[in-house]
Amino acid sequence: MSKRIEVNDLNCFYGKFKAVEDVTMTIEPRSVTAFIGPSGCGKSTFLRTLNRMHEVIPGAYVEGEVLVDGNNLYGPGVDPVNVRRQVGMVFQRPNPFPTMSIKDNVLAGYRLNKQRMKASEAEELLEKSLRSANLWEEVKNRLDKPGSGLSGGQQQRLCIARAIAMQPEVLLMDEPCSALDPISTLAVEDLVQELKETYTIVIVTHNMQQAARVSDETAFFNIAGTGAPGKLIEMGSTEKIFSTPDVQATEDYITGRFG
Amino acid sequence: MTALSTSTTVNPLTAGQLPRYATWVALAGSLLAGGVLDASLLGGFDPGTTLFVGALIYLLVIYLLSRAVEGTRRAADRLATNLVTGAFLLALLPLVSLLWETLSTGLPRFDLQFFSYSMRNVIGAGGGAVHALYGTLIVTGIATVISVPIGLMTAIYLVEYGRGALARGITFFVDVMTGIPSIVAGLFAYALMAIVFGPGTINGFSGSLALSVLMIPIVVRATEELLRIVPNELREASYALGVPKWRTIVSVVLPTSLSGIVSGVILAIARIIGETAPLMIAAGFTNSINTNPFANPMMTLPVFVYDQYAHPGVQREFYTERAWTGALTLIVLVMVLNLIGRFIAARFSPKTGR
């Protein structure tokens, strides 16, 4: 189910502005990869290129290639809609659909894509997704209530349930805990640990302890200065990056000497 | 120790304050003074002048009083509050007066006969506006059916797809259309019908076309605003689930803004339902019921009001009465539409309950 991602010489642009330069990396299947780095260094921008969400912003485009199990996401004739069905995403701020109930939110991926499914299958998928997102016990009695009535942490787990209901190959998480309190953060982190059994997970975080706690691999991004493009400085196993990084800048960032 | 000392000394955070009754006393005193001034100096007592002069005195008195007791900031606050309240009351005056006048002169004929008779063969007393009511409902209904899809789709294009010169051009021309004098819209519809069906083609559909020209830009503007405030996060959430753009618009963006769009459309209808000039040209006059929008002139309520007022028979009072009742019917119609709109808006608005 999960897949290996290879990125070769990727450049991201917003119009004429080059936001990310020359990223080459390999993300292993069934692992958690964390992106760390100071604000504005292109972590989120880069993450969004992995399911072609980058180009949703007017004027934004990408050069280079992203291979998911050898298939180039940016190859000719690739439909971004098909890409996004395989590579799910959870955003920084919880964004459940306000017009839909909890149930409809979880099944939104199927309903909106007009995939036919039996009522029993839908119930099964609903329960499975909510259970995987550690939300089932809290909402099982109010599945028909609006999703926007949940607390922030619950909403974020609802969004995760919505993303994994599509059974994607890869799950991208863009600072999923930055709007959450420590307890909800813990719930999401536990969830990440469980989900990596089945999915390839890439998580952007500003919280280095979080990166150290949840990830197997860590990639450090940095920028030379304002207006300069962000670059991948170093990538390696989390243990190595947090103990003996190869690059001085990585060590400075992790030990808190800058950023 | 500290608790003791604070309870005995004066709290340094307090400031002078006018007692609550001071404003009412000042208001009553000012009005009294206004009345006296009016009666003695301005030549005879008159409620309007008294209120106006009293209000001016009150503004001044409460400002000076507050300045002396409460300080300049609170005084300025009171002055600004009173000025804004005054402006609101002033703006309310014509509205209340208009409603009062329409109700008091229109109610006597607001009866069953008015809504069951046309003006066919009616001279003097009696008669009704059922032909005009049908006409207004049909003409406005067709105009809505034409305008809403066009306006909605234009707004969707502008917000979701439009980039560059074409979108800027459309925005510009929508702005221009908003400013078109309504009589020009009537002439446009008349000319269009004349070209397509031959000169002198006057019918309800032609009136609907004229109203559409006026309604489309209103719908576009209202819908555009509402689509723009749908958070981008919702669109991205939908894209990230692999939902195509068109389905995202239909299933996520539109439902989220539906309640606003409905009230926008209702407001647009309320705005065009009272249009008179274009309908006089495009839909014409008649005294008979005509429910076929594609043949023969069709009466509408605004035109009925104008016609009753401008072309009265010998017994003028009956015509004037009918004109007022027609006006009242229009107001009631708009009000009912607004209520329906509110109901629908409340029904479809995003739910926040737990």
Image (tube, coloured by chain):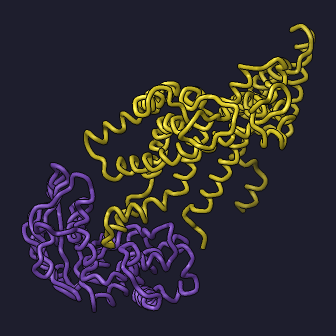
Does residue B330 sit above or below B158 in this rendering? Answer: above
In the rendered view of the protein, which quadrant contains the C terminus of chain B? bottom right
Is residue A125 visible in this depiction of the protein?
yes
Q: Quadrant of residue A93?
A: bottom left
Does residue A205 sit above or below B302 in this rendering? Answer: below
Q: Which chain is yellow?
A: B
Most foreground residue, A8 or B7 = A8
| Image side of residue B19 versus residue A35, left or right | right
Residue at x 30%, y 69% (from the top left corner): A206
Residue at x 89%, y 26% (from the top left corner): B29
Q: How many marks?
A: 0
Most foreground residue, A243 or B96 = B96
Counting from the top left corner in percent of width and height, residue A101 is at: 52, 75
Counting from the top left corner in percent of width and height, residue A145 is at: 57, 76
| Image side of residue A59 versus residue A155, left or right | left
| Image side of residue B307 versus residue B218, left or right | right
Residue at x 88%, y 13% (from the top left corner): B38
Q: Quadrant of residue B231?
A: bottom left
Q: Quadrant of residue B115?
A: top right
In the rendered view of the protein, which quadrant contains the N terminus of chain B? bottom right
Counting from the top left corner in percent of width and height, residue B173 is at: 37, 34
Most foreground residue, B264 or B81 = B264
Most foreground residue, B181 or A47 = B181
Does residue B1 sit above or below A161 in this rendering? Answer: above
Chain A colour in the picture: purple
Is residue B69 visible in this depiction of the protein?
no
Counting from the top left corner in percent of width and height, residue A86 is at: 25, 78
